[in-house]
Amino acid sequence: MKKKILAVLVVCMCFTGVKAQQDARLASLMEEREQLVMEYQFYNQQNSNFWGKKSKADLMHIIETLKKIINKDSELIGAVKAASIKKVAENTVEIQRSGKQVQVDQRQINDRIAGLQSQINTLESQLKKRERSLQDLQTELAASDEKRYGKDKVIAILAVAAFIIFLYAVLLQIRLGKATTKSKKKSR
């Protein structure tokens, strides 16, 4: 475990060291260029000719200094290009990683959406089945209610008929009782 941690630290330090080296190289090149610019300004201010103008040697020094400045600028441009190429490469790698992560995330989201959609479809089909069974049960309830009310109607009609027959029997009994009392009175 300690070896792994040590290895990670060494790798991090190497990357930090490379970055620091690049920064130090750019800083040293900029300092060297500044020195050359100061040298150019010095030679450009020299007027050592007999008539107070620049001598041939002064002009040669100026030309040499300008050549050195151009070379330093070329080195600076090369160093900046190298650093920018490395930075572009790092950015490209990071973009590709993030692109892959986005693709993985998108795939996971699509899978979750598909799973949820299938669950919704399953629940909808179960709901439709329950609605159908509820409708069937309501139809059966209505049919049984009609049978029951039909039987109740028949029972009510028979009860009314029985009551009427009962009343008729009572009425006949009363008439018969009156008729027998009249006949007993007559026979006496």
Image (tube, rainbow, N blue to C red):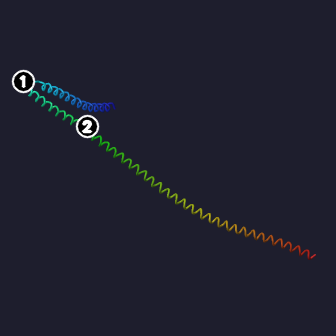
The quarter of the picture where the N terminus appears is top left
What residue is drawn where x is 32% and y is 42%? Answer: 98
Q: CA distance from mark 1 to mark 2?
A: 54 Å
Horizontal side of residue 19 vs 52, given as left or right: right
- When the figure is inspected, residue 4 is found, relative to residue 120, above or below; the finding is above
Between residue 149 and residue 66, name the one nearer to us. Answer: 66
**Amino acid at dot 1:** Trp
**Image quarter of the C terminus:** bottom right
Pick whichever of labels 1 and 2 is earlier in the sequence. 1
Taking depth in this image into account, of 59 and 185 the one nearest to the observer is: 59
User: Which of the two marks, 1 or 2, is nearer to us in this view?
Assistant: 1
Please identify the quarter of the rendering in which residue 12 is found: top left
The image position of residue 146, as x and y in percent, is: 62, 65
Percent across and percent down for residue 123 are: 47, 54
Q: Name, please, the residue furthest toward the right.
A: 188
Residue with the mark numbered 2 = 87
Label number found at residue 51: 1
Mark 2: amino acid:
Lys
Q: Secondary structure at mark 1?
A: loop
- Left/right placement of residue 68 relative to residue 161 reads left
Residue 51 occupies which quadrant of the picture? top left
Decide which of 95, 166 is in the foreground and name it.
Answer: 95
Label 2 neighbour load within 10 Å: few <14, some 14-19, many 20+: few
